[in-house]
Image (cartoon, helix red, strand yellow):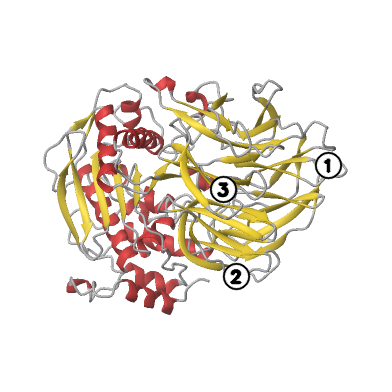
Amino acid sequence: MPLTRRRFAALLTVLTAGTTGVFAVAAAQQTSAEATQDKGPASVLPASVTAGSVVQVVAHPDDDLFFMNPDLVRSLLAGTPVTTAYLTSGEADGVNRANGGAAKDPDQPADRAHYAEARQNGIRSAYAQMATGDRTSAWRRTVIPTAGGGQAELDVLIAKPQVNLVWLQMREARSTGGDNPDSLRGLWNGRIPALASQLTSGTPVKQPFTYGKTQLIQTISGVLEHYRPTTIRMQDPTPGRYGDPGKYTDHQDHMYGARFVQAATADYAERVKDRPRFSVQNYLGYHNGTLPHALDPQTADVKTGFLKTYAWQDGENYCGSPSGCGDRKVAGNPTGKNWAQSLRYSRGDLTSWMTEGTPGRLWAFATLDGQTAYWTRTPAGVWTGPALLPGTGIDPGATAVRLPDGRVGVLATRTTLGSVPVEYRREVVYAVQSAPDGPFGPWQSLGTPERTDEEGTSAISSPSAAVDANGLVTVYLRDSRRTLRASTQQADGGFSEWHRAGGEDLQSDPVTAVDSAGRRHVYATTTKSVLAWTQPTPTAPLVGPFETGLPATTVPLTAAPDGAGVRLYFRRPDSGVVRTALVTATSGKPQVSSVAEAGGRAGYGAVGVAGRLVAGRADTGTISTTGLGGPPAWTESAMLYAGAPGAVLEPSGTTTAVLGLDANLHVTTTPRTPTTPTWHRAVR
């Protein structure tokens, strides 16, 4: 449950015990954390008994605060080693002023080096506040060489040395979508041979440098090699466009910076063999501003408090820097364009990645090291894995399907970087077992409905799938124009071209389920409701889309068979409460029940469902469970995780699984009479 101000203050005291006296100068000042406490309750809890480490790579200072929080603060409070690398200095127009630029204040000339330094100061203050409760907690700033031949600034939080910031200090595009060759976009597309640095005024790095495309990839890969993360957080490399072709839905630096990170993770995975396995989590950017709020008010308020610290909203020169103590451009609107009220994953938020194969045998899939990994559990309850399917470039997220004979298949998307920019593309791939419990065959490409990457930035969703009585698979996805597409397996094993199934304004990933009569259901969220496609009879064509009349959701959707219908699970905007509705299709057009609360107060992200057990993130970010129709509160664990939970109903109860921040599979089995779940690594 959300913390009171007093409990939050006590928590910070515990977390920072023995460290706040290191720099006594901070003791006499009220921190922004204290100011935030005065305004309302917080929803930050220490969480995670999971080992592992996190590296975040973002384009600009504040991308992490806007788009990766509250995941970020959960990790910091849990004591997880966290390193954030900033690709650019974020120098913009060089004017550190709220609600305006140089044209509005001719007495304040542009100074990009000083403005970039102010943003660094704001980030350091926000991280110190998140990790210790004291925005003035000191940092050690040094210079480190990079694998690309340049230099970077490394900042280590002295009170919490597991918290590091790496500043690569490249020049930013200085425009959200404008065609500026001197940018990450220009470097990626080969319009410039090298991109120059933009050093901040206070950085210990004194020698300017440039990076070519390969050098920048080597530099990011080198950061990963140094920190050896088990979880990599990055922005969305395929955010899509508004309209056709339209403007990008995200900042060009976010998109092309993420593509550099994609290339760097591939290089790191292939080049460095002696390292832990890692997963990747992608985060939605500017598009959050067009969607219903995903966070409850308390969590959003705490997140905004950290942004106010970054924005130097109180104007006190507590940091002693002539550049200023934060980013005044954010001070006038610290929530951004409805960004602070949400956190969404742009990949890996489907819950259909675990399934039963032959009786009693479970299969679970995730993406590790850019490859599909799988774990399997025998009927005797023994897990083995992970084993990696051959083939690289696999994006986060997977969908598992069970064929009538007990074989298991897995679907994913694969990104091909290519040797030249026009070869960049994302496609759907499918692999299936040669026999029940047998080995998996090679990846089969289903292609993509996108004609070119440039048209829609390859912004296809993760695939969802349904299997007919003959064992043939139909795959559904959302295309970059936000309509539904489908590809159907033929008798010879091949797949049809992607045909249009209609709909508009589709968000996130479509979901599928089959009711007890064998009728197929497909659902997809929009910004305002949920659309449905159904079969009037098991052998009839899928028809739709139909308006369900359901209210707006926070976007992630889960569908599970429930008697003669399919039960949908989703979260209420501005709340995070899990809600449910039953949809039946006995008369062709879907009939939708009234919406009810399913339990689970607050939280964010998709929920995994099997039987009457619901699993998902509580507002603390931990994997938590509740019973359908039971008490509204979550039964919380102490573990943070990546992606979404998967769940399978078995005769003995419900088995639920998540991928921890340590890149290991963690599971629990809840009996049919629920008890408090005990989570453990599947493979001990």
Q: Which mark is residue 291?
A: 3
Q: Determine the image quadrant of residue 257.
A: top left
**Is residue 110 among the parts visible in the rendering?**
no
Residue that appears at 16% across and 45% down: 144
**Helix, strand or loop under label 3:** loop
**Is residue 256 among the parts visible in the rendering?**
yes
Label 2 amino acid? Ala
Measured as percent of width and height from the top left, residue 249 is found at 49, 37
Label 3 amino acid? Leu
Q: Nearer the viewer, residue 76 or 608?
A: 608
Say if 358 sits above or below 148 in the image. below
- Of the two numbered discs 3 and 2 in the rendering, the one whose residue sits closer to the viewer: 2
Name which of mark 3 and mark 2 comes first in the sequence. Answer: 3
Which residue bears the numbered disc 2? 633
**Helix, strand or loop under label 2:** loop
Measured as percent of width and height from the top left, residue 623 is found at 52, 60
Name which of mark 3 and mark 1 comes first in the sequence. Answer: 3
Name which of mark 1 and mark 2 comes first in the sequence. Answer: 1
